[in-house]
Image (tube, rainbow, N blue to C red):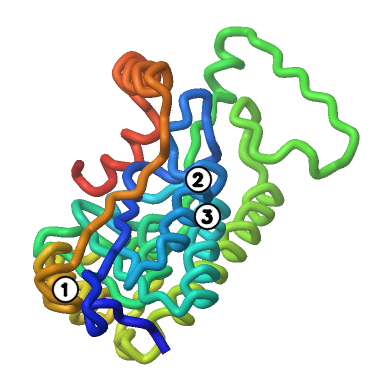
């Protein structure tokens, strides 16, 4: 049974974890969402003997592995400590961002939030004609016939595409299993929710990907009373890390992150 402090005279405490940005392994400037960086934050939130934990999500997705690791950590701690988890979506919780949202017991949106995109994508470029036209010779030597996959400087091979599709299908199946396990009977049975489509606000509620349109403060007050305390929990950074991270985002332009956000018009 979940202990609810406000029933015993104590103000309920809800740590708030912000999951903002693209999802991926830690880079040079540590700007991506990943389990290594967020692990201590999530652990700290659940150690505070909370009434509940809230996730504020604004992410266009990214790494399937990191999405799975972060969501699994949240669920493990929530189950171990019998603490409910609530997710609140801002602009976007799509693809891996939606995977993170499924770690919660319920998902709440703004009327303009974009969510869904339950699919897997691999994109790139091919330059074989370009390098041939300019007299450039591509030299690749491998030990293992499957070592070189979809070399962008060589013509695309059917066997390479087939191998890639196996990888994509496997990841997609895992994503679908996560959504089905977490959302269960709430999902609309008469809709294909796993084709990569996105929904806005109430549309996502109607197909069962979310539970309603609500904002974090009024919703948590409705659940836990007007005296509920929202306690932000975030990554602790040194002054140098904060400055360098900001300069990196501005100077480098975060090209890959921008491509992810641009899929949703942001």
Query: Residue 45, percent across and down?
Result: 41, 57
Identify residue for label 3. 64
Q: Quarter-wise, where is residue 239 in the image? A: top left
Q: Which residue is at a point 54% across and 25% down the rendered structure image?
A: 127
Q: What residue is shown at x 28% (from left), y 65% (from top)?
A: 13
Depth order, front residue of 144/119 = 119
Q: Quadrant of the N terminus?
A: bottom left
Q: Residue sitting at 25 percent across and 54 percent down?
A: 92
In the image: residue 101, left or right of residue 217: right
Between the C-alphas of marks 3 and 2, the distance is 11 Å
Q: Which callout, 3 or 1, points at the residue further toward the start of the chain? A: 3
Label 1 vs 2, first from the N-terminus: 2
Sequence-wise, the earlier of marks 3 and 2 is 2
Q: From what the image shows, is residue 149 above or below residue 182?
A: above
| Residue identified by numbered label 2 | 34
Furthest-top residue in view?
Answer: 135
- Pinpoint residue 96: horizontal percent, then vertical percent: 42, 56
Could you tell me which secondary element the residue under label 3 belongs to? helix
Residue wearing tag 1: 203
**Front position in the image: 169 or 184:** 184
Report the mark closest to the observer, 1 or 2: 2
Could you tell me residue 253's position as x and y percent? 33, 21
Is residue 202 in view?
no
Q: Is residue 6 left or right of residue 26?
A: left
Question: Is residue 180 in view from this perspective?
Answer: yes
Toward the viewer: 18 or 222?
222
Alpha carbon distance from label 1 to label 2? 29 Å
Count of numbered tags: 3
């Amino acid at each position: 049974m979940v202990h609810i402090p406000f029933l015993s005279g104590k103000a309920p405490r809800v740590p708030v974890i912000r999951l903002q940005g693209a999802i991926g392994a830690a880079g040079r400037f540590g700007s991506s969402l990943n389990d290594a960086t967020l692990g201590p934050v999530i652990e700290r939130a659940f150690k505070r003997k909370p009434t509940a934990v809230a996730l504020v999500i604004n992410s266009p997705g990214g790494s399937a592995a990191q999405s799975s690791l972060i969501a699994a950590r949240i669920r493990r701690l929530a189950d171990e400590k019998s603490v409910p988890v609530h997710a609140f979506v801002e602009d976007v919780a799509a693809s891996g961002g939606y995977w993170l949202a499924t770690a919660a017991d319920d998902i709440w949106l703004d009327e303009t939030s974009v969510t869904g995109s339950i699919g897997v994508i691999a994109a790139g470029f091919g330059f074989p004609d370009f390098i041939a036209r300019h007299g450039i010779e591509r030299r690749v030597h491998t030990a293992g016939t499957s070592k070189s996959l979809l070399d962008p400087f060589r013509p695309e091979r059917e066997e390479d595409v087939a191998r890639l599709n196996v990888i994509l299908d496997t990841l997609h199946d895992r994503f679908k299993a996560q959504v089905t396990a977490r959302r269960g009977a709430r999902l609309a049975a008469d809709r294909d929710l796993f084709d990569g489509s996105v929904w806005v606000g109430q549309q996502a509620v109607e197909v069962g990907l979310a539970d309603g349109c609500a904002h974090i403060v009024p919703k948590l007050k409705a659940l836990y009373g007007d005296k509920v305390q929202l306690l932000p929990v975030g990554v602790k950074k040194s002054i140098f890390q904060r400055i360098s991270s900001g300069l990196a985002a501005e100077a480098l332009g975060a090209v890959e992150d921008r491509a992810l956000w641009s899929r949703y018009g942001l």
